Image (spheres, rainbow, N blue to C red):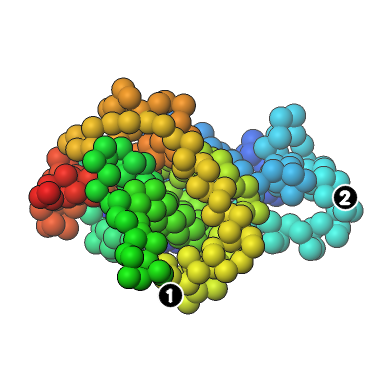
Amino acid sequence: MSNFPDQVDRAALIAEIKLLRERGLPRLPNLQLPMLRRAAEHIIPDPALDDRARVETAFRKAVEKLGGGPYGESAGLLFGLVQGTRAHSSRVRREEAAAAVDRVADTFRKRYEPAMIEEIADNLLSLVATQDARTVWTQMETRHPADSRLAVHWVERFESYYRLWTPIYALGADLTASRSTMLEVDRPFDRAGRDDDPADVGYSQEDQATGYAAFALYRYASFLWELQQFMIRHGGLWLFASPETEIAARDAIYRIGWHVTPFNERDDSWLRQIIGQNPQREMHPFLSRLTDTAIGRATHEEWLQWINSCECTWELAVEDGEYFPTSERHISVDVDCQMHQAISACNTYCRLIDREWYKVADWYQLNATTNNVSVTGEKLYDGLDG
């Protein structure tokens, strides 16, 4: 498989975009645009489309990546992509594009147009690289030969996915542990204080559950931190073989935060800040800030109230095929419970990432299978004696 970004000359691509701008879309079939046509073949690998439709569709995608607002509208006008402007002359299209950003045509030509064209070229290259990665993924799934450089790229991408997987899994596990602790009717954690030690006030089932809840808050803050790093590192781009999987991953991430109802965006920002101020992002300094500051104590209290609002029950031994108990598998878990909806989103993300990785793991000769689910905390606890 060819790797388009290694073969294309960026300067030649920019020159072709300038030519298309000058001549206009109606003359596209008669123009010599080898770089644009090659890019379009990668971006739109649909043999049902003719050459002209493929190039125009790919070009529209690149312009759409500029975003909305006056700048994006200006680019659409410049190339005749806006309805009713396709047949306008080069001069008229430039004037309309300049007006969209409140500039005169000459100023727009000198200061705006060159940068806009370069950005469109870079967007085309980005779209090509994304589609090439999807193609390699499909080849790996079907065990066909794939470009080894792009296969390595997939390993790097999954490293980012699993950086999120770790705190998400731990969040689901600690939230589950906090509630399941209170479901143990024999209350194994209750312990009276010692008469010979006034400082020993004992320990209770509630204390154990509260401890898990604090751990879960640390996990949630770690998730927020890793999500921010993912946004910085990859621009929030979820890349899988299918757009449906990408949507599912984004949806699971969004739902985790959505169902954590005690906190707004400013609260999330504070939690990220506390994690970020700890160079190693360890749990102990984070929990100390919860107890040593007024905002930390208030945040912790709101978190506990959210967790304690859960009244769900379930059999403590988790069924095969799930990481955590959810309403999908346990009828006694309330479908409207906000905490368990967050847990369900954690479960969805973890299973989705594992499933997608298992699809291509044998390409790397890792001998992974799709039927295994990592051992859960509840299963380990259920196996303890006594």
The residue carrying mark 2 is 102
Q: Position of residue 29 (x, y in %)?
A: 55, 39
Q: Residue at (54%, 54%) from the top-left corner?
A: 300
Q: Is residue 57 above or below residue 9?
A: above
Q: Position of residue 320 (x, y in %)?
A: 17, 36
The amino acid sitting under disc 2 is Asp
User: Residue placed at 50% from the left, 53% from the top?
Assistant: 236
Left or right of 131? Residue 96 is right
Closer-to-camera residue (315/266): 315
Q: Residues within 10 Å of mark 1 (few under 14, many from 20)?
A: few
List x then y, in percent, for residue 34: 48, 52
Residue at image coords 65%, 54%: 266
Q: Quadrant of the N terminus?
A: bottom left
Q: CA distance from mark 1 to mark 2?
A: 49 Å
Q: Which residue is the site of mark 1? A: 280
Outermost residue on the top side: it is 331
Residue 83, position as x, y percentages in the image: 71, 30
- Residue 377 relative to residue 174: left or right: left
Residue 81 seen anywhere in this rendered image of the structure: yes
Residue 203 lies, with reference to residue 344, above or below; the image says below
Give whichever of 294, 278 is nearer the camera.
Answer: 294
- Where disc 2 sits, the SS reads loop
Q: Amino acid at mark 1?
A: Gln
Closest to the observer, 91 or 214? 214
Q: Secondary structure at mark 1?
A: loop
Q: Earlier in the sequence, mark 1 or mark 2?
A: 2
